[in-house]
Amino acid sequence: MATITFDTLKFTKTLEASGIPPAQAVAMAEAFREATTGAGLATQTDLRELQLTLEAKINEIKFDLAKWIAGMLLAQAGLVAALVKLL
């Protein structure tokens, strides 16, 4: 997965602007950065790649299913033909 950048300075400044003391804002920003680093968060690109992979697999399954159904229909037609000959 891709690395997600996190602007700790901007985060800290936002917290400070809301009234949080600077030392606490820095600690919170660092804690958040540590919690999200390597957390395996998916990006939009990751999700798009997964979507394309799943769509390809679904199309493959649909194709295999269509082949199986066609084979069953041909087999059924053969059975019907054999039964008609017996009558």
Image (spheres, grey):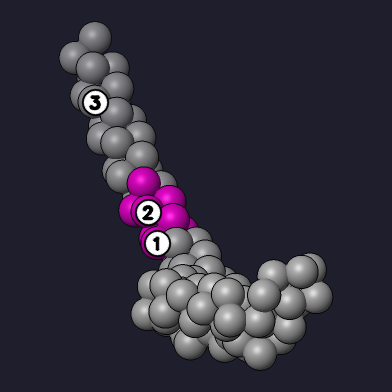
Q: Which mark is residue 61?
A: 2
In this picture, residue 84 sits left or right of residue 2: left
Viewer-closest of 20 and 53 = 20
- Three-letter residue code for mark 3: Leu
Residue pointed to by mark 1 = 57
Local packing at callout 1 (Cα closer than 10 Å; few below 14, some 14-19, many 20+) is few
Per the image, label 2 sits on a secondary structure element best described as helix
Viewer-closest of 57 and 19 = 19
Mark 1 and 2 residues: CB-CB less than 8 Å, in contact?
yes
Per the image, label 1 sits on a secondary structure element best described as helix
Which tag is nearer the camera, tag 1 or tag 3?
A: 1
Q: Which mark is residue 79?
A: 3
- Three-letter residue code for mark 2: Ile
- Three-letter residue code for mark 1: Lys
Viewer-closest of 24 and 13 = 24
Decide: is 62 above or below 32: above
**Horizontal and vertical percent position of residue 30:** 49, 81
Q: CA distance from mark 1 to mark 2?
A: 6 Å
**Horizontal and vertical percent position of residue 77:** 33, 30
The structure residue drawn at horizontal position 37% and vertical position 54%, both measured from the top left corner, is 61
Local packing at callout 2 (Cα closer than 10 Å; few below 14, some 14-19, many 20+) is few
**Helix, strand or loop: magenta stretch:** helix
User: In which quadrant will I find the N terminus?
Assistant: bottom left
Mark 3 and 2 residues: CB-CB less than 8 Å, in contact?
no
Which tag is nearer the camera, tag 3 or tag 2?
A: 2
Among the two numbered marks 1 and 3 on one chain, the one whose residue lies closer to the N terminus: 1
Q: Which mark is residue 10?
A: none
Q: CA distance from mark 3 to mark 2?
A: 27 Å
Range drawn in magenta: 57-65
